[in-house]
Image: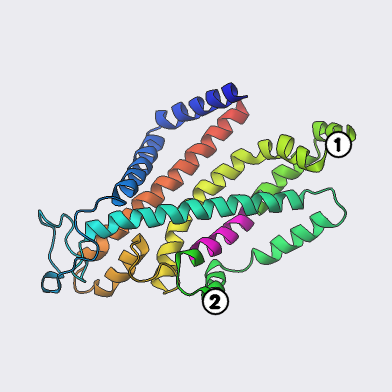
Amino acid sequence: MNRDGARGGSRLWRFVWASGRGRFALIVLALWVVVAAVSLVWTPQPLSSTDGYHAWSGPSLDHWLGRDGTGADMLSWLMAGSWTDLAIVVLTVALAAVLGMLLVAAMVSRARGVAGVAVVAVDALISIPTVLLALVLAVPMGASSAVVVLACGIGYGLNLARIVRPRALLASRSAYVESAVSAGAREGYVLVRHIIPNVISTAVVQLSLSAGTAILAESGLTYLGIGVPSGIPSWGRSLATSVQFITIHPLTVLWPGLVVTVVVVALNIFGDVLRDYGSERIGS
């Protein structure tokens, strides 16, 4: 089983790397992870270092991307923010995956009434906008990264369950699942052994696309004042700070906006390549 998994991973790696789009996505995502790791131990300037007399200074040898309008070093804050956004994306995707798979299990359950209630609940909850959910969570929790993770994780988990359910339902009604149930297999065993393997490719693609959306959501919620709090570096925080000065010094908005755009595009491309890989595997 481990050997088959290693071969599958090797095939996936070669497929992604052979594509020009996939190679671009892998390079960008690898740089993101490296920069995030480096920022934990080093940034060009201390994050607390500000200079009000040169708040609008442009790129120089000491400040490669200039200052952010408050006198802080733009590059240092973007590097430190890369770790915050990486943590938010990982936690959001993990929460969405767990919640989504639990909901899928309920939606294809053979227990009387469970599937119907789960489907109705998902259909009802999925209509709640992520922003509204974040506002509700921000009332007791205040502005925090946890609000972004919970709001996005719950919203994306509901979307995942809705998208994966048809495929999971087909798998649950297949001949081999019926045979396993007739032989006395427990529902949990059937789910892990037969249903999840049939939907994992669809789930992975959807989660990779959700990762890019999580970055955009972090930026939007932080701008609204219910995301990453002031003083905590993040790409959304850099945008929220810089956008106040866009008419005075537009360059301050360029760098965080460019970083967000490039990473989100890379994540979306990665999801598209994974979808192509899944389609090719099914076709072969």
Tell me the amino acid under the disc marked 1.
Val
Q: Which residues are magenta?
A: 148-160
Which circle, 2 or 1, is nearer the viewer? Answer: 2
**Res. 87 mark:** none
Asked if the magenta segment contains residue 155, the reply would be yes
Tell me the amino acid under the disc marked 2.
Pro
Mark 2 and mark 1: span between their CA atoms? Answer: 45 Å
Instruction: Write the residue at 60% across / 38% down.
Output: 201
Mark earlier in primary sequence (2, 1) = 2
Q: Which residue is mark 2?
A: 140
- The quadrant where residue 180 appears: top right
User: Where in the figure is residue 166, as x and y percent of width and height?
Assistant: 71, 46
Instruction: Write the residue at 21% across / 71% down.
Output: 70
Q: Which residue is mark 1?
A: 181
Callout 1: helix, strand or loop? helix
Asked if the magenta segment contains residue 171, the reply would be no
Instruction: Write the residue at 11% across / 70% down.
Output: 54
Which residue appears farthest toward the front when viewing the image? Answer: 41
Horizontal side of 279 relative to 60 (left or right) equals: right
Q: Quadrant of the C terminus?
A: top right
When the figure is inspected, residue 136 is found, relative to residue 114, above or below; the finding is below
Horizontal side of 38 relative to 91 (left or right) equals: left
Q: Are marks 2 and 1 in contact (CB under 8 Å)?
A: no
Q: Quadrant of the N terminus?
A: top right
Residue count near mark 1 (Cα–Cα under 10 Å), binned few <14, some 14–19, many ≥20: some
User: Where in the figure is residue 226, as x and y percent of width and height?
Assistant: 45, 72
